[in-house]
Amino acid sequence: MIIAIDGPASSGKGTLARRLAAHYGVPHLDTGSLYRAVALSLLDAGAYLGDSGAAEAAARALTDDILASPRLRDERTGEAASIVSAMPGVRAALLEYQRAFARQTGGAVLDGRDVGTVICPHATVKLFVTASAGVRAARRAAELRARGEPADEAIIRADIEQRDRRDAERAVAPLKPAADAHLLDTSNLDIEAAFEAAKAVVESVIAAR
Ligand code: C5P
């Protein structure tokens, strides 16, 4: 069983993906971490973020160290990730790794922007998770404050909206729901309620098979 979960930044898709993977006992891949790792490699090397040759080379040379870096979660890394992720060479370099992860015996849960549309078009279940920009900014601000970092909600909201635009308007693998995705708006749901709603979708698809 492959569960594909897509959606914009801070929609709650990562938390849902982790919860569903634990519930069904299958591995989980946060595909955004791959693009974040490419971005962080360039930032650390002091390379120009628009250098698609350097970005593609970084995508082909990702290490466990960089994939485990706590700096992957920084705002700056997320912003930079949305720049390198628009490069076709970077996406092509990361494609097979993601597909191989999805093909594991027993299945997998993958979350990102193009899992249901490009990486796993034949996924068993596709969820597209959304929430209003205001709610997502508030969640992200709470997450940062919990880490002891300062958070200005208005700035975070503007960043989120800019990242949404970049992800949705790019030519390759833009952020959009697959035609057969189940839409889940978590604006008014807490984590538990969102998990129950997502699980109900998965159960209904399994029952109908
Ligand atoms: O999901 P997360 O915020 O960690 O993703 C960081 C960035 O990586 C996104 O803004 C997006 O540009 C890119 N991304 C992507 N395709 C994916 C996952 C993430 O383009 N499957």
Image (cartoon, rainbow, N blue to C red):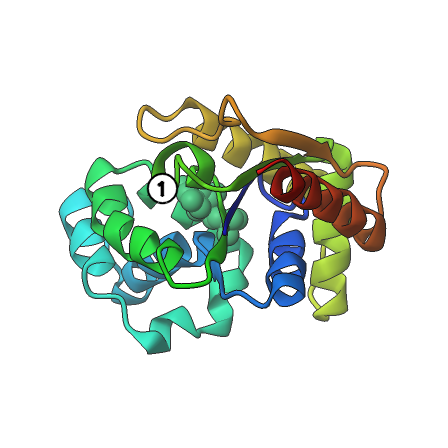
Position of 160 with respect to 53 (left or right) is right
In this rendering, does residue 48 appear at all?
no
Q: Is residue 191 left or right of residue 127?
A: right
10 Å crowding of disc 1: few (<14), some (14-19), many (20+)? many
Q: Is residue 65 above or below residue 208?
A: below
Assign the C terminus to one quadrant of the image.
Answer: top right
Residue wearing tag 1: 119
Image coordinates of residue 203 in percent, x first then y, are 69, 45
Label 1 residue SS: helix
Q: Disc 1, ligand 1: is the CB inside 8 Å?
A: yes
Residue 123: x percent and y percent?
A: 45, 41
Which residue occupies the foreground of this view, 111 or 107? 107
Q: Position of residue 105 (x, y in %)?
A: 39, 63
Q: Residue at x 84, y 42 (%)?
A: 189
Query: In the rendering, at what x and y percent does residue 80 appear?
Result: 40, 48
Q: Is residue 61 above or below residue 77?
A: below
The three-letter amino acid code for the residue at tag 1 is Ile
